[in-house]
Image (cartoon, rainbow, N blue to C red):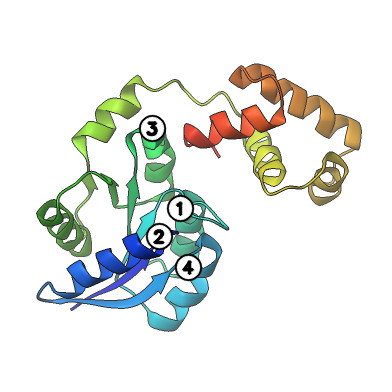
Amino acid sequence: MIRLLIADGLRLTREALSVVLASEPGMQVVAQVPRGDEIVPNALRTRPTVALLDAHLPGLDGISAATQLKAALPRCRIAILTTPERASALRTALEVGVEGFMSKGVSVNELTDSVRKVARGDRVLDPRLVTDALHAPDNPLSERDTDLLRLAARGHTPPEIAEILHLSPGTVRNNLAAINRKVGARNRIEAIRASSARGWI
């Protein structure tokens, strides 16, 4: 029996996926999760064999949630569902150890087939997303840049970021200005939007 955790910020999508997959022989939906930061607690409670995560979840994005889930429940296999504009997140997803990376444009048959393959331990990569990822610009952000921008995206001010990361406020302001230049943004909001859209944070 494939025990499924489904995480999507949109209730209709989450419930529709659950109904479709639960109707498949040998599949059981054990958890529906609306937020990325609720995935690990739900997974530890329900012990899914496969987690199907939206790449763009509220609370914590799907790739970051996958990282946490791999650490907390290493035997759980993970498939990410994403849109073509976030195809560049493929490289990060593979580094995390995600087994599936699929477009939200797949058919029901393709999705159920992919879930079964992921459950068996196969890697499933949507060829359209792979093609898009190969043509996406490389991520110019360092690990520190990513940490800074993720904290800024969560609403932290530069002084708060400085305290969290044990840096001086001046260093944080300088790094945020450098990030703007790296991603071609005029300000922090644009940098967050551009980096998020490309799957860099």
The amino acid type, in three-letter code, at marker 1 is Gly
Closer to the eye: label 4 or 2: 2
- N-terminal of the pair, mark 3 or mark 2, is 2
Q: Are marks 1 and 2 in contact (CB under 8 Å)?
A: no
Q: Which residue is mark 1?
A: 62
| Residue at the image position 66 percent from the left and 43 percent from the top | 153
Seen from this angle, which residue lies furthest front?
Answer: 12
Q: Alpha carbon of mark 4 to alpha carbon of mark 2: how far? A: 10 Å
Instruction: Tell me, for residue 85, which label it has, or none.
Output: 3
Q: Answer with mark 4 or mark 2, whichever residue precedes in sequence.
A: 2
- Kind of residue at disc 4: Ile
Q: x and y percent of residue 163 in the render?
A: 86, 49
Image point (34%, 63%), residue name: 12
Disc 1 to disc 2, C-alpha distance:
9 Å
Residue 84: x and y, percent?
33, 34
Q: Earlier in the sequence, mark 1 or mark 2?
A: 2
Q: Answer whether labels 4 and 2 touch (C-beta < 8 Å).
A: no
**Mark linked to residue 8:** 2
Query: Residue 133 is drawn in which quadrant?
Result: top left
